[in-house]
Amino acid sequence: MGALDGQVALVTGGSRGIGRATAIALAEEGANVVINYTSNEDAAKATAAACEQHGVQTLVVQADVANVEDAQRLVKAAEEQFEKIDILVNNAGINRDKTVARMAPEDWDAVVQTDLSSAFYVTNAAVGGMRTRKYGRIIQISSIQGQQGAVGLSNYAAAKGGMIAFTKSAARELARDNITVNAICPGYVETDMISGLSDEVKQTLLSRIPLGRFGRPEEVAQTVVFLAKPSGDFYTGAQLNLNGGEYM
Ligand code: NDP
């Protein structure tokens, strides 16, 4: 018996990295999982197969969550298949790092749209069913950069900081319906998102982390599980920092 038996989780960007680890960790606890991706169908199917090893059902849905119609279609597909969404993990994200002076408006728009507006689009579509059933656990994958900012990441930091502010407002609005909304703020995590950094940059980043290492996707996934299980029931509007001490 898992703590999430019979529940349904929707993970945006579940094909790779943190989203993949999260989908699998939720499946380990018994949740049926909807796995969203935008372009890597094979990776999304591989995540689904890994989830099914734990005896749960899955649904794989291609949708660009930066697009409002796609986001709505994603939620509709999940609700048609499983009749409800208990746990929503707004995880899909991209980065396009440039200094403010060099950043094209398109780089700003793409990151804000994908990392912030998507969380609103999917939450907006999913929250009606949660309110009707008086239950929901909405978990945003924000970032340490939304808390402290970073050189070359103004678009990303603005989106992730916006996600934290969105979390607090939504938490206040939705508490009466037994829907909690929390933000996980990881520091650097070893995924494709940081695999392109040079060794030199990685060493500089590591030197700023008291625990002296990057995070692992599975560590973020276990924080999601903590919030989704009854252990997280009294958390709402919170920021859970998971960063090796880089930001305190
Ligand atoms: P990855 O690059 O490894 O994976 C990104 C995931 O998001 C993929 O599944 C990708 O799908 C999906 N995705 C991207 N754009 C869209 C879109 N428009 N619609 C639907 N899905 C999309 O990233 P991480 O796992 O590292 O990051 C996951 C989240 O965690 C992001 O929000 C990121 O900002 C955040 N984060 C990451 C940190 C890190 O250091 N890695 C630190 C702090 C926060 P596909 O495979 O189809 O491309």
Image (cartoon, rainbow, N blue to C red):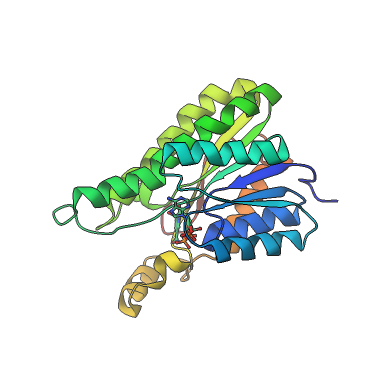
Which of 124/161 is in front? Answer: 124
In percent of the image, x 25 and y 58: which residue is there? 152
**How far across and how far down the image is residue 8, in percent?**
70, 42
Q: Is residue 56 left or right of residue 116?
A: right
Outermost residue, bottom side:
199
**How far across and how far down the image is residue 39, in percent?**
47, 59
In percent of the image, x 66 and y 40: which residue is there? 232
Classify residue 198 by image quadrant: bottom left
In percent of the image, x 57 and y 24: which residue is there? 174
Outermost residue, left side:
101
Which of 133/226 is in front? Answer: 133
| Residue 86 visible in the displayed image | no
Q: Is residue 51 above or below residue 133?
A: below
**How far across and how far down the image is residue 196, in percent?**
36, 72
| Residue 134 visible in the displayed image | yes
Q: Is residue 82 left or right of residue 38?
A: right
Which of 106/63 is in front? Answer: 63
Q: Is residue 64 left or right of residue 76?
A: left
Q: How many marks?
A: 0
Outermost residue, top side:
176
Q: Is residue 76 left or right of residue 165?
A: right
**How far across and how far down the image is residue 241, in percent?**
50, 50
Classify residue 50 by image quadrant: bottom right
